[in-house]
Amino acid sequence: MKRAFYFVFTGLIVLFHLSGFNQPANAQFVTDVGDITMGAGISQGSSVGHLGDSEFGVTMQIFYGISEQIRGGGGYTYYFIGEDDLGANEFNFDGHYLFRNRDNALFYGLAGINISRILADGDTWENVSDRRFGLNAGVGLEYDLGNFSLFGEPKFTIGGWSQFLITAGARLRI
């Protein structure tokens, strides 16, 4: 897991450098006050639910620009568990602090609250519903392509399922 974190972190630094991180400060903002962005992506959690397995999921997000440097919002991830009658999902309520918000590039730190839930149903598993709470911390990179942007977001959840989650996808400003 440490290798994955270092690989993602190094990749983000390289992307910042290539995207013109040190351009003039008078460039246009990528996200501004009052902007609403909706996004969707593919996620992989390192330790989903009671099984503790790495699982793929689909994530949907919505964010609101509170200021030029802060936006907040929420997201929902549904995990595709390979076991019959077993399901897992999570809600994340995160705030982004935008370190870089110019020249088509956005670099941000994130922190928030995680609510994880696993559902077991049927003969194989007893009817169980387990909900756990945790805290999120991570970073993200978003690159604006006009009407939409591409993003990558690695983060850790402490508590709850205590996992490393990486999400990649697209966001649309509405």
Image: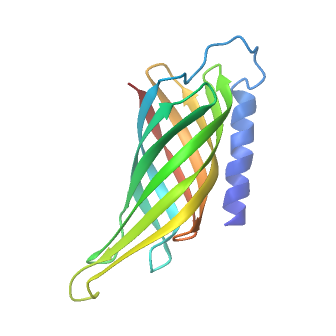
Q: Position of residue 123 (x, y in %)?
A: 21, 89
Number of marks in picture: 0
Q: Position of residue 134 (x, y in %)?
A: 54, 65
**Vertical placement of residue 42 versus 116, above or below:** above
Quadrant location of the N terminus in the rendered image: bottom right
**Vertical placement of residue 19 versus 73, above or below:** above
Q: Residue furthest front?
A: 66
Q: Position of residue 100 (x, y in %)?
A: 69, 29
Q: Position of residue 67 (x, y in %)?
A: 58, 27
**Vertical placement of residue 12 versus 149, above or below:** below
| Residue that appears at 47% across and 54% down | 92
| Residue that appears at 74% across and 26% down | 21
| Residue that appears at 43% across and 21% down | 147
Quadrant location of the C terminus in the rendered image: top left
| Residue that appears at 57% across and 22% down | 30
Q: Residue furthest left?
A: 122
Q: Is residue 98 left or right of residue 36?
A: right
Occupied quadrant, residue 152: top right
Q: Is residue 84 left or right of residue 104?
A: left
**Vertical placement of residue 85 versus 58, above or below:** below
Q: Is residue 147 left or right of residue 161?
A: left
Q: How is the image coloured?
A: rainbow
Residue nearest the observer in this picture, 80 or 78: 78
Occupied quadrant, residue 17: top right
Q: Residue furthest top?
A: 26
